[in-house]
Amino acid sequence: MSEIEKIKNQFFSKLEEAKDLEKLNQIKSELFGKNGIISNQFKVLATKSDEDKKTFASELNTLKNDLQIIISKKVEKIKIEEINKKLENEKIDVTLPERSFRIGKIHPVSQVIDEISSIFSEIGFSVEEGPDVENEYNNFTALNTPKHHPARDMHDTFYLDEDKKTLLRTHTSPVQIRTMLKGKPPFKIIAPGRTYRSDSDQTHSPMFHQLEGLHIDQDISMGHLKGCLNYFIKEFFEIDKIKMRFRPSHFPFTEPSAEVDIGYEIKNDQIVIGEGNKWLEILGCGMVHPNVLKNVRVDHKKFQGYAFGIGIDRLAMLKYGINDLRAFFECDYRWLNHYGFDPLDVPTNYRGLSK
């Protein structure tokens, strides 16, 4: 019996036996918490062969959705049973005012991370994580960033010591360095997480969220990169066609490098992604620089690949019509109540919970 079948049999039985909300919340945490069983299974993707990854990811996402639907229905059933029980045993004073209550919401950033991870898992990417506090080598040197590069400047980077050896990571790219140093190619990973830069305005904040993508193997080309990004953008924005272009750029860790623009148009004062005569820059990408592969002891003559970096906060702003990045971090309940997602809603597809 496969591991997914074991999880399915075990937790379908547990959910059937659960009789109260406390037990359901315990099971939900055991499944979907940060170190939950389902969350850890997505990390297992890295150990699967290329042939098995897509099947495993599809089965895992199906199981995830089935479990969430069962939990949602079970919660509703228990609540109805509790109400009926109270109606039978308690006398209700209809003259009393109702008690105030608040229901928590999933933050748009957490929602988008879940959507992106699900999309990339469908095409064989596994999820990797790394620490927020990094060393200078992983964050800059191993990624072929010169000593004089502006990104190393104190104006951009939060250093934690006078020698500038320890810092808050400026991107999630150090995760690719850690992943390649501890393993052997091929690699096919995404690395979502928090990053930090000394910047603050309507579209920038000192802390923000980024997703790094990396695919290293034999005979990988820019064509594979374009196909991967084309698939992701269409799936994320839930559109059938996308107008996309690669614009030459420069990053120390990729060669050649490109900025990716997508077409859009304005309708009823809203941005409509897909077609149109306007262009919107959405991410940076390129082929991994041979020097980066040398720094992680990967044979650059045998292996090559692509990398890309996506701003998670900006994707959330685009998809859900949020016009100020600073609102993500202000802890305004009214804002979160409007833009957040109900954790008990039934999923509409594998990408995450419905709004």
Image: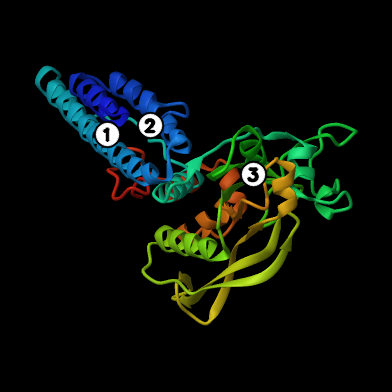
Q: Quadrant of residue 305?
A: bottom right
As shown in the figure, which amino acid type bears the numbered disc 3? Thr
Q: Quadrant of residue 275?
A: bottom left
Question: Which residue corresponds to the image point at 19% horizontal and 19% vertical from the top-left?
Answer: 17
Sequence-wise, the earlier of marks 3 and 1 is 1
As shown in the figure, which amino acid type bears the numbered disc 1? Leu
Q: How packed is label 1: few (under 14 Cα within 10 Å), some, or many (20 or more)? A: some
Question: Mark 2 = which residue?
Answer: 38
The percent position of residue 105, horizontal first and vertical second, equals 42, 40
Looking at the rendered image, the disc whose residue lies closer to the viewer, 1 or 2, is: 2
Looking at the rendered image, the disc whose residue lies closer to the viewer, 3 or 1, is: 3
Say the numbered circle drawn on residue 84: none
Q: Are marks 1 and 2 in contact (CB under 8 Å)?
A: yes
As shown in the figure, which amino acid type bears the numbered disc 2? Ile
Question: Which residue corresponds to the image point at 63% horizontal and 42% vertical from the top-left?
Answer: 176
Question: Mark 1 = which residue?
Answer: 67
Sequence-wise, the earlier of marks 2 and 3 is 2
Which quadrant: the N terminus?
A: top left
Q: CA distance from mark 2 to mark 3?
A: 23 Å
Q: CA distance from mark 3 to mark 1?
A: 31 Å
